């Protein structure tokens, strides 16, 4: 199980570094007139920072999939929330000073993950039926429609709504990756969960980039963390059979709550340091 924890933390490091680069790239891209514009992805893909961020995202995703093979979803997703702590510590290299509260939050993330690692039972995915696999791409499309509507909402709620939808889609990627059982190409192409990974991943990047471009990065990132941790963790427990070691359920609950709450306290470190520059 130890190597699964290592993979989860490697994914957090990769995602944390990627989020800063992608936030800066999104803020430096010309804003669309209104709503969610799919062409935003084409514009940000012209920026080296976003491309480098995507490369780190890919590495993080591979590490995340490896972790999901042996760890419960609630452990892996909480570890990914720790990417904000990684970003906060990395900000020291840029001359950003952390307050005592922020140092405490970073330490709390580490303590929370330690508790989760102690409480987790080694997992293999509990088999689910064909209906569950078919429901995954459908859920991605439904969330995509909700995200498009959120992009047309008032500025007051748009950023947080887009961040939440993006987080739910990132969580859907994790759930889909967890239930994929085949490693060969024909098996992957025949599994609806494979297409859910692709569709949910692309939509999540689009909505998160839009949220970063048009509003508070702190608000968008905080809602994304909630979306990508709480819902997948619940699915893991109630549907996929995730569990803790005997007698360690309270430890897991405390660890999860501590890690996610502390990560939310560090959400501002998704904010790019430089002011927006129009392309």
Image (cartoon, rainbow, N blue to C red):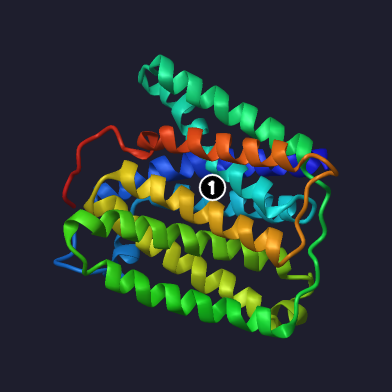
Which quadrant of the figure contains the N terminus? top right
Where on the picture, by quarter, is residue 39?
bottom left
225 left or right, relative to 73 = left
11 left or right, relative to 248 = left
Q: In the rendered view, tell whether residue 34 sits above or below residue 58.
A: below
**From where the camera sits, is residue 196 visible?**
yes
- Residue 102 on image: x %, y %: 43, 22
Of residues 133 and 25, which is closer to you in this image? 133
- Residue 85 on image: x %, y %: 50, 31
Write the residue at 38% across / 34% down.
269
154 left or right, relative to 74 = left
For label 1, the residue is: 56
Write the residue at 64% across / 74% down.
194
Where on the picture, by quarter, is residue 150?
bottom left
Q: In the rendered view, tell whether residue 141 sits above or below residue 212.
A: below
- Residue 84 on image: x %, y %: 48, 36
Of residues 28 and 232, which is closer to you in this image? 232
Please tell me how many numbered marks the rendered image carries: 1
Q: In the rendered view, tell whether residue 230 sits above or below residue 239.
A: above
- Residue 207 on image: x %, y %: 36, 62
Write the residue at 71% across / 43% down.
7
Q: In the rendered view, tell whether residue 271 sits above or below residue 207.
A: above
Crowd tier of the residue under label 1, counting other residues whose Cα lies within 10 Å: few below 14, some 14–19, many 20 or above: many
Where on the picture, by quarter, is residue 257?
top right
Of residues 99 and 241, which is closer to you in this image? 241
The local secondary structure at tag 1 comes to helix
Write the residue at 38% across / 39% down.
270
**From where the camera sits, is residue 44 visible?**
no
């Amino acid at each position: 199980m130890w190597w699964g924890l290592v993979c989860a933390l490697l994914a957090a490091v990769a995602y944390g570094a990627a989020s800063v680069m992608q936030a800066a790239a999104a803020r430096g891209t010309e804003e669309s007139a209104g709503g969610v514009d799919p062409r935003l992805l084409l514009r940000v893909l012209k920026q080296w920072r976003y491309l480098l961020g995507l490369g780190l995202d890919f590495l993080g995703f591979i590490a995340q999939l490896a972790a999901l093979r042996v760890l419960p979803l609630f452990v892996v997703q909480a570890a990914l929330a720790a990417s904000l702590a990684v970003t906060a510590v990395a900000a020291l290299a840029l001359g950003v000073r952390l307050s005592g509260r922020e140092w405490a939050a970073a330490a709390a993330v580490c303590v929370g993950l330690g508790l989760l690692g102690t409480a987790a039972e080694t997992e293999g995915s509990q088999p689910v039926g064909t209906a569950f696999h078919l429901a995954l791409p459908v859920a991605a499309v439904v969330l995509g429609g909700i995200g498009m509507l959120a992009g047309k909402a008032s500025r007051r709620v748009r950023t947080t709504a887009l961040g939440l939808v993006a987080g739910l889609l990132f969580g859907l990627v994790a759930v889909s990756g967890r239930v994929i059982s085949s490693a060969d190409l024909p098996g992957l192409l025949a599994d609806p969960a494979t297409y859910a990974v692709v569709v949910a991943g692309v939509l999540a990047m689009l909505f998160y980039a839009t949220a970063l471009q048009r509003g508070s990065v702190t608000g968008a990132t905080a809602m994304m963390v909630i979306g990508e941790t709480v819902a997948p963790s619940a699915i893991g427990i109630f549907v996929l059979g995730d569990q803790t070691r005997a007698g360690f359920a309270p430890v897991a609950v405390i660890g999860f709550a501590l890690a996610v709450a502390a990560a939310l306290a560090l959400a501002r470190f998704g904010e790019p340091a430089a002011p927006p520059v129009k392309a």
